Image (cartoon, rainbow, N blue to C red):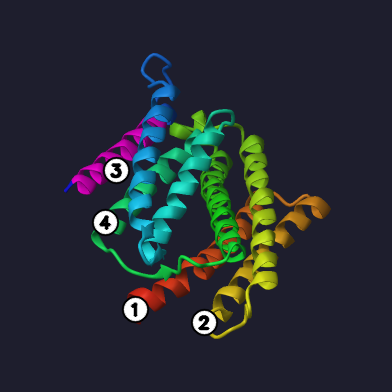
């Protein structure tokens, strides 16, 4: 019962924080806009409660319970943490209206659909490092994907000469695009480390239960690599950059969670 109340409080705080950042975009009158500090405080409070729940759910007597919805919830927590830290100094508030409600949704799904998929307590540090770098890479590139969606909406409105509503409150197009590429660069480095650690420390990255994840991760890595090369060599931007970003992220999401969802939710395997 106590955990349920904490979960409800965390969900409410995430939603309220997301609402604050959304209102800041849609209300141009500074007197009617809620303070940015309020959104940050609500967000960090939600993060603390979320972290407590994750600790209870992940750590068991028999190892770390990295079930599908636990993994999704943990990834959402990392994404929210990175977002709120970035929001302290960078103009990324617009991401909050998507990322924070999504974190709330993962908490609800984790609560109502619990599962068991244990990582043994004697798991070596190499595998733990691989898992952590993978989650960090996914989290940063997820932020880049949301940024790409907002960039696409902004670009479409500007092309039609209708920069109204929250579009007017967004940073300039060039700033939005630069932020997206900063995220992609960081995410690409983390994804490279995740893949390298997997090939070095895991026994066989092309084993039957890993081959789909490995191949999809490599395709995603290639997509982001081509995008960064195209940006450097040919100055790719705009719709081309958005398409490559979203394609790479969709493939990466399938690699990280697609096969896990099939195994745990469809096939019901441990």
- Distance from disc 1 to disc 2, alpha carbons, whole Å, reads 15 Å
- Secondary structure of the residue carrying tag 4 is helix
Label 1: how many Cα within 10 Å (few below 14, some 14–19, many 20+): few
Q: Name the residue under label 2.
A: 209
Look at the image and say whether residue 142 sits in the magenta stretch: no
Q: Which residue is drawn at 44% across and 39% down?
A: 96
Q: Name the residue under label 1.
A: 266
CB contact under 8 Å: marks 3 and 4: no
Q: In which quarter of the image is the C terminus?
A: bottom left
The stretch in magenta equals 2-23
- Distance from disc 4 to disc 2, alpha carbons, whole Å, reads 27 Å
- Secondary structure of the residue carrying tag 1 is helix
Residue 205 circle label: none
CB contact under 8 Å: marks 1 and 2: no
Q: Which residue is drawn at 51% across and 30% down?
A: 168
Q: Mark 3 points at which residue?
A: 11
Q: In this view, does 145 lie to the left or right of 199?
A: left
Q: Earlier in the sequence, mark 3 or mark 4?
A: 3
Which callout, 4 or 1, points to the residue nearer the camera? 4
Q: Is residue 238 above or below residue 138?
A: above
Q: Name the residue under label 4.
A: 111
């Amino acid at each position: 019962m106590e955990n349920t109340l904490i979960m409800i409080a965390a969900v409410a705080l995430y939603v309220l924080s997301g609402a604050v950042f959304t209102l800041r975009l849609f209300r141009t009158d500074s007197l009617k806009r809620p303070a940015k500090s309020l959104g940050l405080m609500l967000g960090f409070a939600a993060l603390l409660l979320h972290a407590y729940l994750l600790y209870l759910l992940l750590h068991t007597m028999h190892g770390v319970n990295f079930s599908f919805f636990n993994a999704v919830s943990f990834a959402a927590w990392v994404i929210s943490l990175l977002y709120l830290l970035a929001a302290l100094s960078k103009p990324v508030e617009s991401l909050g209206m998507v990322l924070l409600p999504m974190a709330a949704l993962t908490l609800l799904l984790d609560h109502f659909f619990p599962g068991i998929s244990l990582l043994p307590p004697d798991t070596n540090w190499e595998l733990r490092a691989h898992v952590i770098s993978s989650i960090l890479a996914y989290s940063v590139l997820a932020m880049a994907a949301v940024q790409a969606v907002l960039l696409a909406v902004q670009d479409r409105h500007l092309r039609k000469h209708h920069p109204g509503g929250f579009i007017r409150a967004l940073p300039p197009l060039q700033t939005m695009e630069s932020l997206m590429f900063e995220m992609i660069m960081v995410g690409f480095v983390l994804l490279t480390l995740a893949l390298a650690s997997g090939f070095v420390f895991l026994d066989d990255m092309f084993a039957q239960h890993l081959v789909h994840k490995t191949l999809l991760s490599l395709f995603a890595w290639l997509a982001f690599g081509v995008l960064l090369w195209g940006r450097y060599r040919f100055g790719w931007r705009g719709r081309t950059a958005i398409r490559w970003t979203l394609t790479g992220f969709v493939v990466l999401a399938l690699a990280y969670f697609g096969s896990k969802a099939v195994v745990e939710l469809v096939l019901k395997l441990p």
